[in-house]
Image (cartoon, rainbow, N blue to C red):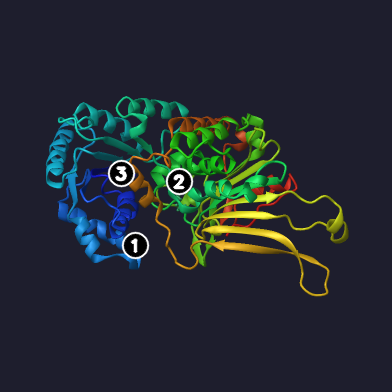
Amino acid sequence: LQPVEAVLVIFGGTGDLTSRKLIPALHNLKAKDSLPQHFAVIGVGRRQLSDQEFRKNLYPALRQAVGENLRADTWAELQERIFYRRFDFQDERGYRVLREFLEQTDAAYQTGGNRIYYLAVAPEYFGVIVEKLYANGLVRNRSGQGWQRVVIEKPFGRDLATARVLNRKITAVFSEKNTFRIDHYLGKEMIQNIMVLRFANPLFEAVWNNKYVDNVQISATETVGVENRAGYYEQAGALRDMLQNHLLQLLTLTGMEPPVSLTTEAVRDEKVKVLRSLRALAPERVAGDVVRGQYGPGRIEGGQVAAYREEKGISPSSDTETFLALKVEIDNFRWAGVPFYIRTGKRLRAKSTDVIVQFKALPPILYVKEHGELEPNILIIRIQPKEGVYFQFNAKKPGMDPSISPVKMDFCQNCDFENNSPEAYEKLLLDVMRGDPTLFTRWDEVEYSWKFVDQIAQTWGEDQRISSPVPYPAGTWGPAAAGELLARDGRAWWSPG
Ligand code: BG6
């Protein structure tokens, strides 16, 4: 599939996502000659800016994101195709003006009526924008030519009920095929690699089950705090910000059965089955198996940082969780009895996302009888910042000494060429232009994820014991209770990185 000519309309053109992620991704695609020849970008937002001012404002974040890979000639060419229109999302007139401008752009850049409407705005606008795009003839353009696709950033609702309402509004206008619900983790190189590692290596797939696997740990730790997103984050917390989307997606890719083919729908079908097999979290299990934390003050990378409740825009009595750890069971034939431990948090000791597969202990015979318990085999799929695969196994120590010690095989994908992997948004934007939704979430994936997450949110809302998060010092691995969650099962978290 080749990317085809299109106009990309970014709602929320003056927002962070546009300058920090989308424009850098477009620059990099252009530098690799991967953008279609006929292409233009229209940023829309509420501020009054000329095209020139808009382009100029994008530059500092672009330079920061792309660093030394910034190419002046590429940016010069790209920015000539970037425009800005002031726009009030509620105002019908704006949509009509935009429609006319799009028609002119089609004529000027031969973009054939193909449009990508990228909704990088606060979620309360998703529904209204989609409705008004349709009402004002922006979805089926007058000539009836071309396709129109919508890309929706998260959060896709704040629970199942609101997600359903939103989905109804979107599907009333755009077909599922033209709806791209973005989860930027799916654009990460090593996350796409999970399926390849599993299904292109008989060695891994043969042991990827409850006969050999003791437990799986999915860990996404961050050092950043809430940054300048207080308004959004206070509503979301780690549960909605990370678990509902990125982490459950990682769980599905790690746990899924081999699909019947590599087509979009076959892959999505298997992912949904994992979500459908998740054991329900009754209130008692939420109390016991889910740890909720919030960062206090502490030191990270040598600097003192403030508590969450002291951050700008955060209520001093906020009960929003910035950390979450939980134990999940997949009740199917492959995984029955194998716990999946998931954790994520902000202001932790290090930034790292990993999938860790710990294999079962040996029976107490032979070397175990002689030497005592040996280190388990461990396979780590490193998603970021290091990308690669690490395998720990046991070997005899060289020499006369009969002892056994763990050794490693370490494949590092991004060690030799720093940042050689394309940024997630490059891949995902290209896929939208190609019309390939494989790395986007289908509605039923969203639906089942919310069903799972809602059980936790509801219990937190109702159960006094867990209605407040446990504080943890910034710069640690989170509340002690997260360690106890595994210690109780005779296990421990593997250090990330
Ligand atoms: C976003 C969350 O989706 O993912 C942020 O809203 C989080 O809170 C970010 O920091 C993490 O993404 P990455 O790519 O840096 O791991």
Residue for badge 2: 186
Q: Residue at x 57, y 57 (%)?
A: 389
Residue that lies at the very extreme toward the bottom in this rendered image? 399
Residue 141 shows up from this direction: yes
Secondary structure found at label 1: helix
Give the foreground label among 2 and 1.
2
Is the CB of mark 3 within 8 Å of ligand 1? no
| Up/down of 483 relative to 162, above or below | below
For marks 3 and 1, give the one nearer the viewer.
3
Is residue 319 at all visible to an observer of this figure?
no
Kindly indicate the quadrant of the structure image that contains residue 9: top left
Would residue 328 be found to the left or right of residue 194 on screen?
right
Mark 3 is surrounded, within 10 Å at the Cα level, by few (under 14), some (14 to 19) or many (20 or more) other residues, namely: many
5 or 73, which lies in front? 5
Q: Which residue is mark 3?
A: 433
Q: Name the spot of residue 1 as percent of width and height, x first.
A: 34, 44
Q: Toward which corner of the image does residue 315 lie, by quadrant?
A: top left
- Residue 253 vs 419, above or below: the answer is above
Say what amino acid the circle numbered 3 marks: Met
Could you tell which of marks 2 and 1 lies nearer the N-terminus?
Answer: 1
Residue closest to the eye, 427 or 181: 427
Name the mark on residue 66.
1
